[in-house]
């Protein structure tokens, strides 16, 4: 167990910029791991930063659960239909392609369509719950502004999910209640009513549950099937998952500086002056395993990279 606290570790790195971090150090056998939580200062409860593209992991998991509730397979086609009376298909996407696009290129279209599929009310009331490990998370907006992918919450949604093998189809309809879930949590970055918010603690917990699904108690597990776990973790059948170091954007390289041979599962994010990294790192050579959620408020990615490197070296011991 590292003797240095996260406060002492990260304070000297770009001390002039705000930082948020939560780290889970993991030891013990694969079927009974032990998780030790560490938070940088008040990161466990802080939502005063923009979570950017890291939240796209949330919609991937929530959409998988939605498909399972509908009794549909993962390899489903989603048709997004304009409101009546027109009823025109304006966008169509295979669900595994949507997840792959999010992990491969962090596509805003795929994230926004997943948000439309689940719906603001369902996502914020039925998925972002304490039972699912979320304490300070709300999503209120998509990341595209123009048709056909834009999510206008004031427009009723009509999505047809079809099993391409059997032809079975289920129609998902919903209309936003008008509730601002981010405002209830006290969010204020970009917008207190339509902003997205989350803590590094919630980010790390979501990834922990995805990566350690089989090893954690049943009551902590997301409703995910084996093929969905494979899609989210490694990718499958040509689709990209969390394990995609070839798509690292530069600031995550700090982890690989400290642990060059490690397996690396991650979802990055950046917008304006925020850089974020959410990663599960497993280095069999040194026995190092940890989950890291990190955010830095800076126009320069160097600070995020140095924090990633410091956390990886700290976890290695």
Image (tube, rainbow, N blue to C red):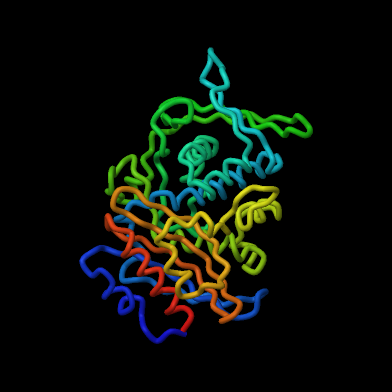
The residue depicted at 61 percent of the width and 42 percent of the height is: 66
The residue depicted at 32 percent of the width and 45 percent of the height is: 183
Q: Is residue 85 above or below residue 183?
A: above
Q: Position of residue 187 (x, y in %)?
A: 31, 50
Left/right placement of residue 182 relative to residue 161 reads: left
* Camera-nearest residue between 206 and 305: 305
Q: Residue 292's image quarter?
A: bottom left
Left/right placement of residue 11 relative to residue 51 reads: left
Q: Residue 77's image quarter?
A: top right
* Camera-nearest residue between 2 and 205: 2
Q: Position of residue 145 (x, y in %)?
A: 39, 31
Q: Position of residue 214 (x, y in %)?
A: 67, 65
* Residue farthest to the left, as pictured: 16
* Camera-nearest residue between 4 and 310: 310
Left/right placement of residue 146 relative to residue 97 reads: left
* Residue farthest to the top, as pictured: 85
């Amino acid at each position: 167990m590292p003797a240095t606290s996260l406060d002492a570790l990260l304070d000297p790195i770009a001390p002039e910029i705000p930082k948020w971090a939560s780290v889970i150090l993991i030891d013990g056998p694969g079927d009974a791991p032990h998780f030790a939580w560490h938070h940088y200062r008040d990161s466990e409860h802080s939502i005063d930063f923009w979570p950017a593209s890291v939240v796209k992991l949330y919609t991937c998991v929530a959409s998988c659960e939605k498909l399972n509730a509908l009794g549909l397979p993962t390899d489903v086609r989603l048709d997004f239909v304009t409101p009546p009376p027109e009823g025109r298909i304006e966008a169509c996407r295979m669900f595994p392609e949507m997840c792959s696009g999010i992990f491969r290129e962090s596509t805003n279209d795929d994230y926004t369509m997943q948000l439309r599929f689940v719906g603001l009310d369902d996502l914020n009331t039925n998925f972002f719950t304490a039972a699912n490990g979320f304490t300070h998370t709300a999503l209120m907006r998509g990341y595209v502004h123009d048709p056909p992918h834009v999510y206008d919450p004031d427009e009723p949604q009509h999505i047809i999910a079809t099993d391409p093998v059997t032809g079975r189809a289920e129609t998902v309809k919903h209309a936003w209640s008008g509730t601002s879930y981010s405002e209830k949590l006290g969010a204020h970055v970009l917008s207190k009513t339509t902003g997205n918010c989350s803590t590094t603690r919630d980010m790390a917990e979501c990834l922990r549950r995805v990566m350690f699904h089989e090893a954690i108690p049943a009551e902590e597990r997301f409703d995910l099937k084996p093929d969905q776990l494979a899609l989210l973790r490694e990718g499958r059948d040509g689709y990209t998952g969390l394990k995609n170091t070839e798509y690292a954007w530069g600031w995550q390289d700090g982890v690989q500086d400290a642990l060059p041979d490690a397996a690396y599962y991650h979802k990055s994010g950046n917008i304006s002056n925020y850089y974020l990294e959410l990663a599960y790192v497993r280095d069999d050579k040194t026995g190092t395993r940890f989950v890291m959620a990190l955010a830095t408020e800076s126009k320069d990615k160097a600070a995020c990279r140095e924090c990633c490197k410091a956390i990886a070296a700290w976890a290695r011991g």
